[in-house]
Amino acid sequence: MTVAAIVPAAGRGARFGGAENKIWADVGGKPLIEWTLSALDAHPGIDSLVIVGAADELDRIRQAAKMLTKAAQVVAGGATRAASVLRGLESLDAGVQTVLVHDAARPAVPPDLIDRVLAGVRRHGVAIPGLPCTDTAKLCDAQGRVEATLDRPRIALVQTPQGCRRDLLERAYDLAGPAANETTDESSLLERAGIAVHIVAGDAANVKVTLPVDLAAVRRALLGRSDGEVRTGLGYDVHRLTSERELWLGGVRIEHAQGLEGHSDADVVVHAVCDALLGAAGLGDIGLLFPPGDPAHRNRRSTEFLAEIGARLRAAGWQVTNIDAAVLAEAPRLAPHRTAMAEAMAQALELEPERISIKATTSEGLGPVGRREGIGCWAVATLQRAGG
Ligand code: CTP
Ligand code: MG
């Protein structure tokens, strides 16, 4: 059977809130809808995709669909989910015999769930994934008064993809006419038409992102990590002093007879902070990201590296809780520059300056730093995984 996935994505995400449609919410550096599309694209039982988007988001969705390996069309949706799905249904190729309708807002759909739905369609014509209801369920009136207690073992909480033979879904839309808009999923429409719907086992990981809190469950399912996770990283750097160069520390140019040797501006404070941040996030170190031999980085401001690292951390879902740096220098006196350094680094990281602390100490004449041969810096950084 030739299978097409119809992906309704044309909602507004009103319950999710936010400035834009929830399908663009960030999950591990990618918009939510890209995860959904990739899952369907990767499934061997699906031949093509039709993505139904809001009229003003079609270009952006087309862009997201470019990475797909299977044939994919993008069409404009309607005012209700049922209207959007109908648009998808109308634009299917003639050869399509089976449709799987899958919410764009369910990015963590497991492949074996899709297998079960397809097997159910082959057997029964219509199959949808359902979960058992674990709480006691009541039927209530509009005033919240209980009318009846439902028979819990007979209740299924249903998900998508909802699979059916194409001709059955077309018939159900024809029979319902405009009343189709009153339904919130395909199976209700099929039920109205008297077509039998079968349940296959759903999966709790296949959450629909409806409220902001649902993002946490989706991140857990897709990225295998939980929100609120805290990590710490350590960074250290030392550079040799020379009379040939300007002194840059913590992103600030400091008046001094000597500066530091190095490929970039040799800002030892920023370098230690970069390594602390990268270490906490498990993203390597500054030498890996900005190789010292690379002419592209020659004489670059180290705060540019810091800004890029800040962007990478945000993309990976990390927030910087705080940074603490201890500079080892016999001279110059750094206390007057502490605020400016915190501000410069905070700006590069798009952070409040209060989250950055800088201390300086001499080495009492001991060791290479004490002999004024160089300046060193230790830094620790604490990161927290962004909440959902
Ligand atoms: N959908 C659609 N066209 C509509 C309404 C919804 O294609 N007119 C899609 C949504 O984009 C979503 C799926 O149907 O992927 C499930 O709907 P829902 O979770 O209700 O999403 P929204 O309608 O966007 O959210 P809300 O109801 O909170 O506004
Ligand atoms: Mg809706």
Image (tube, grey):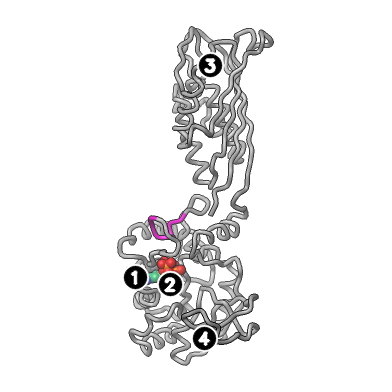
Residue range of the region highlighted in magenta in the rendering = 19-25
Is residue 116 visible from the viewing direction of this image? yes
Quadrant in the rendering for residue 150: bottom right
Mark 4, residues whose alpha carbon is within 10 Å: few (<14), some, or many (≥20)? many
| Residue that numbered label 1 is attached to | 77
Position in image of residue 338 (x %, y %): 51, 22
* Residue in the foreground of this view, choosing between 43 and 139: 139
| Figure check: 149 above or below 328 | below
Position in image of residue 375 (x %, y %): 58, 16
Q: Gap in Å between the C-alphas at discs 1 and 2?
A: 11 Å
Magenta highlight on residue 54: no
CB-based contact (under 8 Å), mark 4 and mark 3: no
Amino acid type at mark 4 = Gly
| Figure check: 384 above or below 48 | above
Label 4 beta carbon within 8 A of ligand 1: no
Residue 125: mark: 4
**Comes first in the chain, label 4 or label 1:** 1
Residue 6: mark: 2
**Comes first in the chain, label 3 or label 2:** 2
Label 3 beta carbon within 8 A of ligand 1: no
**Comes first in the chain, label 4 or label 2:** 2
87 relative to 293 in the view: left or right: left
**Comes first in the chain, label 1 or label 3:** 1
Q: Secondary structure at mark 4?
A: loop
